[in-house]
Image: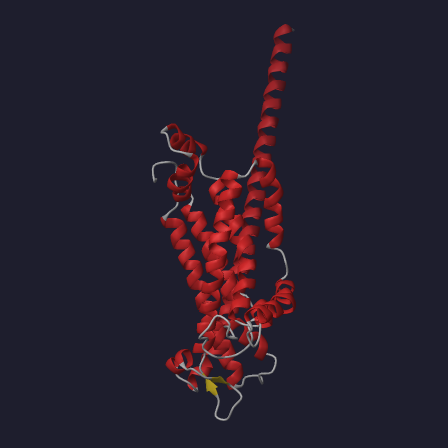
Amino acid sequence: MAHLLYLLERRSSLYLKKSELIIKVGMLKDRQQRERYIKKLFFGVALVSITILFLIVFFLFIEGVPIFKVVSIKDFLFGRYWYPTSDPPDFGIFPLIVASIAVTAFSSTLAIPLGVMTAIYLAEVASHRLRELVKPIVELLAALPSVVIGFFGMVIVAPFLQNVFGIATGLNLFNASLMLAFMSIPTICSLSEDAIYSVSQEIKEASLALGATHWQTIYRVIIPASLSGITTAIILGMSRAIGETMVVLMVAGGATLIPTSIFDPVRPLPASIAAEMAEAPFRSDHYYALFATGIVLFLFTLAFNMIADHVAHKYKQVGTATL
């Protein structure tokens, strides 16, 4: 009798173990199936994003390339006159390119030192309480609508420049550079501060242990270690400046001339596209020329992003061995 009970208990335990094994295998299969579904979902989302981007670029080139049947690439890029509605029309965007480069260069001259030095102060000098107070404010500045910044430059800054410097108009290259710098500083500061703050604590402690002062540690150790992130932040800030539309449309002056002074009115590439697209007849030469201008602007921003990616990989800090 006891032997029979033992056999029954053993058989029951074997059935239980088999049932548990079947349940575990079923749960594992369900989990693997869910993971496959999630993987396919993420792949689909990524594929949709890439497809949309490809279609935008394809549409841009399809609508922009026909202008080169009317004007050569050389005359388009280096022509000094932009009169698309005259007879015969002139489609030279060289003044627009110079204006975009000048506005980006002057705004970067203002934004880069201010953004990077503010980032260094917040990450290495300021107290924790002050950092927690100032960092969100800086990030909120990046969320200001560009039309608000442009309105401020047009209503407040332009009359101030006109009265102080005695110039004909306050809507000029300097005003546009100032407003774009104001827009770029939060981006440069926030990303640079994150890069500096993420430098390993052991690197800082090793420098201080060798007798370096705090400031020597900052510019000889911390900045080189975070150079990849700082450079990426700078280039992304410059990309935002060269691609900004509303601010330069409102405060740059709108003159398609090559500037000879920082107080000359200019018209960068984005401003020209925004100002004229609504009035260009559909599928006209003017229409195609504006899309070709968009191609040039796209290539500029693509070059900035490629440079940022190259610098990020070239100076990427891995541990302490790459210092």
Q: Identify the residue shown where x is 63% and y is 58%.
A: 144
Image location of residue 156, percent across then percent down: 64, 66
Image location of residue 141, percent across then percent down: 61, 54
Whether residue 195 is situated above or below residue 60 in the rendered picture: above
Note whether residue 62 is visible.
no
**Which of these two is toward me, 186 or 284?**
186
- Check the image and name the residue furthest to the bottom: 87
Q: Identify the residue shown where x is 42% and y is 54%.
A: 309
Image location of residue 237, percent across then percent down: 50, 57
> Which quadrant is the C terminus positioned in?
top left
- The answer to which image quadrant residue 207 occupies is top left
- The answer to which image quadrant residue 204 occupies is top left
**Which of these two is toward me, 48 or 196?**
196
Residue 258 is left or right of residue 27, and the answer is: left
**Which of these two is toward me, 28 or 286?**
286
> Which quadrant is the N terminus positioned in?
top right
Image location of residue 287, percent across then percent down: 53, 82
Q: Identify the residue shown where x is 62% and y is 70%.
A: 159
Whether residue 138 is situated above or below residue 11 in the rendered picture: below
